[in-house]
Structure formats: structure tokens, C-alpha cells
Amino acid sequence: EGSGGDEEGSGGDEDISGRRLGAGTYTVAKMKILPSQADAEKYRTHPDNQDRERELYRIAYLHHVEIGSVSDNSIRSLESEQRDMKKEMVDSIQHQEKELKEELKEGMDMFRQMEEEKTKELEQTFIQFGVIMSVCCFVAGGFVVHFMRR
């Protein structure tokens, strides 16, 4: 349900073009804003971690219901699992980084090899061109000498 403010009344700021900003007020009630499918997927718990997440929710709930009812062993166990998960993630990232570096090195080596091959081919082409030009000059010189004698 919206109610517009008076357009010519006082109040509201003006921007640099002289237009009135904030001249009206609107009220929105009982509106649900739902996340898009992409947003829901982005924040969804990975299937491998759903059991751990349920356990954390349960402990958090118990902590709020009965403060002190969660044993220290449960908390230490969860903290240990969390450290293990972080270590696994770091190890996985480091492994992927190492693989990517190796792939990049292989690609660069292959590029250098191709560049060297093309450079050799180009040098051979220039040598062939030089030989052909020398022969053409020699033949042209022979024609000039032949026609000058006549």
C-alpha cells in the first residue's frame, strides 16, 4: 500500500539537476523477498558436510535451551573436526595450485618449443629466398651481358 507525498511541498533533497529527491514516501508491508535459485545454490551446504551442519545446529539449539548442557568433549570434538576440515581444504587447494603450476609450466614449455621450431622454419625460408634471389640476379646479369654483346 503506498501513499504519495505532496510533490510541491517542502522537504526532500534536490540533486544537481534540480530534481526533487525523496519527495514522496511509500510503505511496503507483508512482503516476502525470496532468494533466486542461484543465490540458494550458492549458500547451500555441500552434501558431504550436511551431517556436521545438523550437529552444529543441534548443539547451538541445546546451548540456547540449556546453557552448559553441552559437554566440553562435544565442543572439542566439533572444533577438532572443524580444524580437520580446514586442513583438508587447505591441502586440497595447495594440491590444485601445484597441479595448475605444472600445467602452466608444460604449456609454456610447449609454446617455447613451437616458437623455436617456427623460428628455424623462418630462417630456412629466408635462406631459400636469398638463394633464389641470387640465382635470379645471376640469370638477369647473364641476359644483360648476352644482349649487350649483340
Image (cartoon, rainbow, N blue to C red):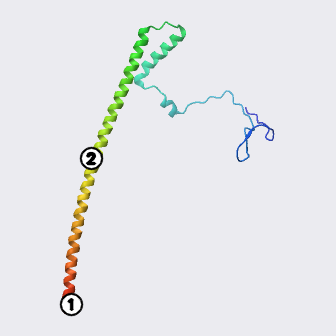
**Rendered view: 131 above or below 85:** below
**Rendered view: 77 above or below 27:** above
Displayed quadrant of residue 133 = bottom left
Mark 2 lies on a secondary structure that is: helix
Q: Which amino acid type is shown beneath numbered disc 2?
A: Asp
**What quarter of the picture does the N terminus occupy?**
top right
**Rendered view: 4 above or below 137:** above
- Cα separation, mark 1 vs mark 2, equals 58 Å
* Residue depicted at x 34% and y 28%: 91
**What quarter of the picture does the C terminus occupy?**
bottom left
Residue 142 falls left or right of residue 2: left
Mark 1 lies on a secondary structure that is: helix
Mark 1 and 2 residues: CB-CB less than 8 Å, in contact? no
Displayed quadrant of residue 80 = top left
The residue where tag 1 is placed is 148
* Residue depicted at x 23% and y 59%: 120
Q: Which residue extends farthest bottom?
A: 150
The residue where tag 2 is placed is 109
Work out whether residue 111 or residue 141 is closer to the camera in this orientation and state it.
141
